[in-house]
Amino acid sequence: AQSVTQPDIHITVSEGASLELRCNYSYGATPYLFWYVQSPGQGLQLLLKYFSGDTLVQGIKGFEAEFKRSQSSFNLRKPSVHWSDAAEYFCAVGEDKLSFGAGTTVTVRA
Amino acid sequence: NAGVTQTPKFQVLKTGQSMTLQCAQDMNHEYMSWYRQDPGMGLRLIHYSVGAGITDQGEVPNGYNVSRSTTEDFPLRLLSAAPSQTSVYFCASSSDYGIGADTQYFGPGTRLTVL
């Protein structure tokens, strides 16, 4: 069965500091991996996705994620956080059916 | 394109009432799905459809019905609402079955409260 674990429920980061959100997955084959962001009261927006190829994936809003098969991880990073990055972030795995992690809430302090 | 639209945005029901959450997309996507989002649990798949006339169950289908008579619309029906169905509901669509080929686009959500 496929599943996703996001170990950090809540992260607080200062504006301008770097951010890393962890994601570990369980999947039987080559995984399709996604990161979504949800701003308060909004739907989900795709940040980036990994299907195959280069293990470092670039996304929108300056985010990137690295797929590490040996660690079953797909961590999301951003070098310098902006106040507008405060949101909830979801990692997901799957092909025809997505399984989502519980999410990580990011708070940005001035 | 409007993308994926959902109505209503908010709804309050009493236990035992029925209602239909509407979802429509104008991208000619074959694949549509319904998720519910609960605190600390992420999104869980309720039902999905790979094309008009074809639906299947997801992870948490009990208490919900779906049908897909057209490519554009994928309504979710609650036959007899229960407090456990209080949640935020998201509809999503993508162009292919086997979403490795494409991205799922999400609607803005419907916030449902069952008293």
Image (tube, coloured by chain):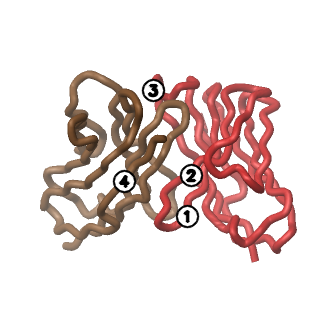
Chain colours: A brown, B red
In x, y percent, where is residue B87? 63, 64
Q: Amino acid at mark 1?
A: Asp
Residue contact between numbered discs 3 and 2, judged by CB atoms under 8 Å: no
Residue on which disc 3 sits: B100
In x, y percent, where is residue B80? 85, 63
Q: Amino acid at mark 2?
A: Arg
Marks 1 and 4: which is nearer the front?
A: 4
In x, y percent, where is residue B14? 82, 74
Vertical placement of residue B98 versus A13, above or below:
above
Assess disc 1: are there few (<14), some (14-19) or many (≥20) residues with their C-alpha within 10 Å of its C-alpha.
Answer: some
Q: Amino acid at mark 4?
A: Thr
Asked which secondary structure carries label 3, the reply is: helix
Residue on which disc 1 sits: B38
Q: Is residue B50 left or right of residue B101?
A: right
Assess disc 2: are there few (<14), some (14-19) or many (≥20) residues with their C-alpha within 10 Å of its C-alpha.
Answer: many
Subunit that carries the residue with mark 4:
A
Assess disc 4: are there few (<14), some (14-19) or many (≥20) residues with their C-alpha within 10 Å of its C-alpha.
Answer: some
Q: Are marks 3 and 2 on the same chain?
A: yes
Residue on which disc 2 sits: B44
Residue contact between numbered discs 4 and 3, judged by CB atoms under 8 Å: no
First in residue order: circle 1 vs circle 2: 1
Subunit that carries the residue with mark 2:
B
First in residue order: circle 1 vs circle 3: 1
Asked which secondary structure carries label 1, the reply is: strand
Question: Which residue occupies the foreground of this view, A40 or A106?
Answer: A106
Q: Are marks 4 and 3 on the same chain?
A: no
Quadrant including the N terminus of chain B: top right
Q: Are marks 1 and 2 on the same chain?
A: yes
Residue contact between numbered discs 1 and 2, judged by CB atoms under 8 Å: yes
| Point 62% across, 30% down: residue | B31
| Point 86% across, 67% down: residue | B17
